[in-house]
Image: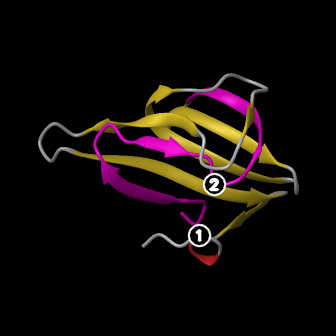
Amino acid sequence: NGTGVLIETEGGAYVEAVRSGFVISVGNQEKLGKTVGIEHYDGSESWYGMLSEIEVKLYDHVDVGQPVGKVATNEETGKGIFYFSLKKGDDYINPNDVIDFE
């Protein structure tokens, strides 16, 4: 829907913060399940959803590359999947424009 991407990874893999900042949201979102929101020092936000575990608490400082949670493992495929989005104000940023997914 233009607000984020689904990323497939190894099952049980850690999801890492793409930028430093502080945790502004931890909890369950209606369609994304366990979700973490981080506000970065430039005012942008990153959101990580569909997590099986959350590794941070509200207001924690996080460094780039720090684990914020774990993906759930699909028992049939052995792979994990999680939701990721970037936001600046009310506008979503295409993650492909700022992050190399290869």
Disc 2 marks a residue whose amino acid type is Val
Characterize the local packing of mark 2: few (<14), some (14-19) or many (20 or more) Cα atoms within 10 angstroms: some
Q: Residue at x 60, y 60 (%)?
A: 3
Q: Residue at x 75, y 48 (%)?
A: 20
Characterize the local packing of mark 1: few (<14), some (14-19) or many (20 or more) Cα atoms within 10 angstroms: few
Q: Secondary structure at mark 1?
A: loop
Query: Who comes first in sequence, dot 1 or dot 2?
Result: 2
Check contact, mark 1 vs mark 2: CB within 8 A: yes
> Which contiguous range is marked in magenta?
1-28
Disc 1 marks a residue whose amino acid type is Ile
Report the residue marked by disc 1. Answer: 99
Q: Quadrant of residue 66?
A: top right
Numbered circle sitting on residue 61:
none
Residue 30 visible, this orientation: no
Q: Is residue 93 left or right of residue 95?
A: right
Query: Residue 47: horizontal and vertical position, in percent?
Result: 63, 46
Image quadrant in which the N terminus is located: bottom right
Query: Residue 98: horizontal and vertical position, in percent?
Result: 65, 72
Numbered circle sitting on residue 18:
2
In magenta segment, residue 8: yes
Q: Is residue 86 left or right of residue 41?
A: left
Q: Is residue 75 above or below residue 54?
A: below
